[in-house]
């Protein structure tokens, strides 16, 4: 099976190299997907709010909204309105350029470092109490794409901060249609009870950070948080590159 997958990825990479010659998505420089100069142009999100009502917080769900979601907070590294950010995420996710996960993972790492300096974020003060996981793909979509972009990002963040990385903590119980064309209500219905724990673990003294590339209505992260709360963890926070419209 591993040999077959290895051949598959080799062929896929060869085809992608033909279809999408390597050039910086920001400025067009050759032989690199995203150059250091363009990376520096991405500004971090400075205005963190309650992800539900936009009241001013450090990204935490405010007291008025706590009964509306299973999430305790959401951290967004940058703004989706930035065209370079949109292009990076879209190219990684839909053109299957796996190497872009390195740049986007570095973006999350740098954001967390800067966020902690400015906000003295208590959760990050105890790395041994943090569990990192990723929004899982259904096995059908994983086979189509060849990788889970959220898992690649989560692995980079966990390695940098030495967090406990649990990539297979959650499982999609069923295949769900793409969220792209659905309304807010449709997204919530589409994902209701779509996730379950693959492992029975007790995180009663820990906080879980679940990573995805983009959050829109929070339907995906909320359903994941609902399943993760079964581990008895203290809090579940989402961490994404950006939030869509």
Image (cartoon, rainbow, N blue to C red):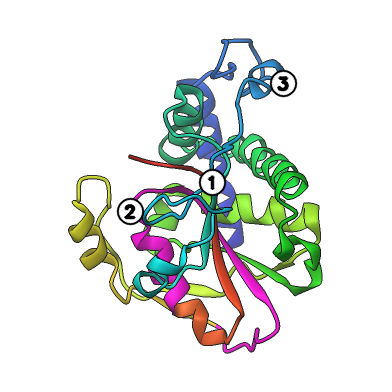
The mark nearer the N terminus, 3 or 1, is 3
Mark 1 vs 2, N-terminal side: 1
- Tell me the element at label 1: loop
| Element type at mark 3 | helix
| Picture disc at residue 48 | 1
- Marks 3 and 2: CB-CB under 8 Å? no
Quadrant of residue 186 in the image? bottom left
Residue that label 3 marks:
36
Range of magenta residues: 199-226
Say which residue label 2 marks.
217
**Residue 147 appears in the figure:** no
Number of other residues with Cα within 10 Å of mark 1, as a class: few under 14, some 14 to 19, many 20 or more: some
Is 67 placed above or below 90 here?
below
Q: Residue at x 58, y 56 (%)?
A: 151
Question: Which x, y percent locates residue 152?
Answer: 61, 51
Structural crowding at the residue carrying mark 2, measured as other residues with C-alpha within 10 Å and reported as few (<14), some (14–19) or many (≥20) = some
**Label 3, label 1: how many angstroms apart (C-alpha)?**
26 Å
Where is residue 16 shown, x and y percent of the image?
A: 49, 29
């Amino acid at each position: 099976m591993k040999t077959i997958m290895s051949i598959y990825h080799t062929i896929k990479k060869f085809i992608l190299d033909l279809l999408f010659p390597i050039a910086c998505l920001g400025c067009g420089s050759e032989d690199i997907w995203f150059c250091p100069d363009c990376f520096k142009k991405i500004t971090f999100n400075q205005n963190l709010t309650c992800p539900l009502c936009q009241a001013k917080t450090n990204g935490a769900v405010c007291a008025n909204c706590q009964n509306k979601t299973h999430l305790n907070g959401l951290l967004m590294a940058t703004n989706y309105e930035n065209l370079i950010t949109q292009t990076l995420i879209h190219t990684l996710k839909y053109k299957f350029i796996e190497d872009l996960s390195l740049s986007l993972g570095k973006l999350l790492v740098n954001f967390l470092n800067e966020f902690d300096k400015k906000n003295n974020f208590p959760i990050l003060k105890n790395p041994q109490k943090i569990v990192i996981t990723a929004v899982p793909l259904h096995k059908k979509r994983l086979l189509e794409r060849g990788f889970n972009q959220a898992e690649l990002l989560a692995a980079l963040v966990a390695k940098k901060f030495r967090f406990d990385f649990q990539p297979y903590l959650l499982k999609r119980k069923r295949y769900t249609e793409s969220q792209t064309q659905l309304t807010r209500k449709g997204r919530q219905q589409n994902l209701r009870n779509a996730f379950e724990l693959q492992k029975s673990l007790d995180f009663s003294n820990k906080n879980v950070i679940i990573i995805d590339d983009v959050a829109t209505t929070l339907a995906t992260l909320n359903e994941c948080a609902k399943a993760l709360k079964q581990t008895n963890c203290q809090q579940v926070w989402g961490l994404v590159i950006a939030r869509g419209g």
